Amino acid sequence: MKLLVTGGAGYIGSHTLQQVLAAGHEAWAYDNLGKGHRQAVPDGRLVEGDLHDTDHLTEVLRTYKINAVMHFAAFALVGESVEDPSIYYNNNVAGGISLANAMRRADVKRIVFSSTTATYGIPNRIPIDETEDQRPINPYGFSKFVFEKLLEDFAHAYGWGYAALRYFNAAGAAKDGSIGEDHTPESHLIPLVLQVALGQREKIYMFGDDYPTPDGTCIRDYVHVLDLASAHLLALEQLSDGTAIKVNLGTGRGQSVQEIVEACRRVTGHPIPCEVVARRAGDPPELIADANLAREVLGWEPEYTDIEEVIRTAWAWHQSHPNGYQ
Ligand SMILES: NC(=O)c1ccc[n+]([C@@H]2O[C@H](COP(=O)([O-])OP(=O)(O)OC[C@H]3O[C@@H](n4cnc5c(N)ncnc54)[C@H](O)[C@@H]3O)[C@@H](O)[C@H]2O)c1
């Protein structure tokens, strides 16, 4: 197939682009490089452009004879979305609508969309399955929820086939260490802990140790970025007119902040000093996926189920690229 990967110069998009190309598809990243990295994209595979530029997107979809889109491009910082919701509605909702309009014009009807556990808000049950109500509690989660709804309506009205993949916490890096995670600012736990091990940060701040969890720190489900990439390929294969896939992508296992720090100590051999500070507003104690539907519907089986293995791939990337792509 011929694929356009929006946000293909970003963390998850670049790993997926590599896998899509290795699987024999033709694919191009479409990215404004606002947060992404030119070096994360193979030569000749980057189209620079912004989601809001509907005319340019339409032209690109037509010129490259694109059959399907993988849509990663978005802003994804929960705290920032609360402080400045306008940029989240503009980029994730208005930008998404611009993409959808370009796809309509170019008659592209297949899309795999990066959704998120943040669309669930505070879940009623753990592990979280797809019957859980989607009641996002911040503008980021809401912006993703809105685009899921758009896809639902477009599938119904225009026969689009789509998959909304609700990722839990992405982690890890490419097996060969060629690409990895480089966010500015970094807000994800594993790279922050590894930056302490590299001597780039003094210590890790743990936001609360009085949650109702075994060690008192928050529990999250860390899914390897290569497993997310393989789910995209599997989802793509399933899409036909009117297909609507909505599935969680996680390992079904949770790790507390404390457990992640301990696993990073074992992998890096660094003591990794920590300081417990106040809870952050809106952090649910526990987010763990029930990913059985992804197994059933996509035939997806995450390869990385051992957190130390996930961390080892991230550590290899951070050691070989201490300043990221710079
Ligand atoms: N990282 C996670 O743990 C996680 C979890 C759940 C969902 N997600 C979703 O996965 C997707 C990818 O996340 P990531 O961690 O790789 O983020 P990222 O910031 O590394 O990648 C996003 C990419 O999109 C590009 N982009 C953003 N706005 C654009 C625009 N208007 N026009 C063109 N390009 C634009 C950026 O330059 C960047 O390269 C996002 O949609 C995010 O919401 C991520």
Image (cartoon, helix red, strand yellow):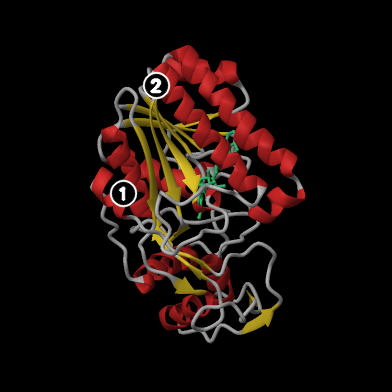
Q: Which residue is mark 1?
A: 294
Relative to 129, is 207 above or below?
Answer: below
Which amino acid type is shown beneath numbered disc 1?
Ala
| Residue 34 in the image, given as x and y percentages of width and height | 63, 40
Near mark 1 (Cα within 10 A), the count class, few <14, some 14-19 or many ≥20, is many
Give the structural element (helix, strand or loop) at label 2. loop
Give the structural element (helix, strand or loop) at label 1. helix
Name the residue located 55 percent from the left edge and 52 percent from the top edge.
118
Q: Are marks 2 and 1 in contact (CB under 8 Å)?
A: no
Residue 75 makes an appearance in the image = no
Q: Which residue is mark 2?
A: 109
| Residue 77 in the image, given as x and y percentages of width and height | 63, 52
Which of these two is toward me, 134 or 301?
134
* Quadrant holding the C terminus: bottom right
The disc at residue 168 is none
Residue 165 makes an appearance in the image = yes
Name the residue located 35 percent from the left edge and 53 percent from the top edge.
226
Instruction: Give left or right: position of 205 versus 251.
Output: right
Instruction: Give left or right: position of 50 versus 179.
Output: right
Which amino acid type is shown beneath numbered disc 2?
Lys
Between the C-alphas of marks 2 and 1, the distance is 22 Å
Relative to 186, is 34 above or below?
Answer: above
Which of these two is toward me, 207 or 4?
207
Name the residue located 50 percent from the left edge and 42 percent from the top edge.
9
Mark 2 vs 1, N-terminal side: 2
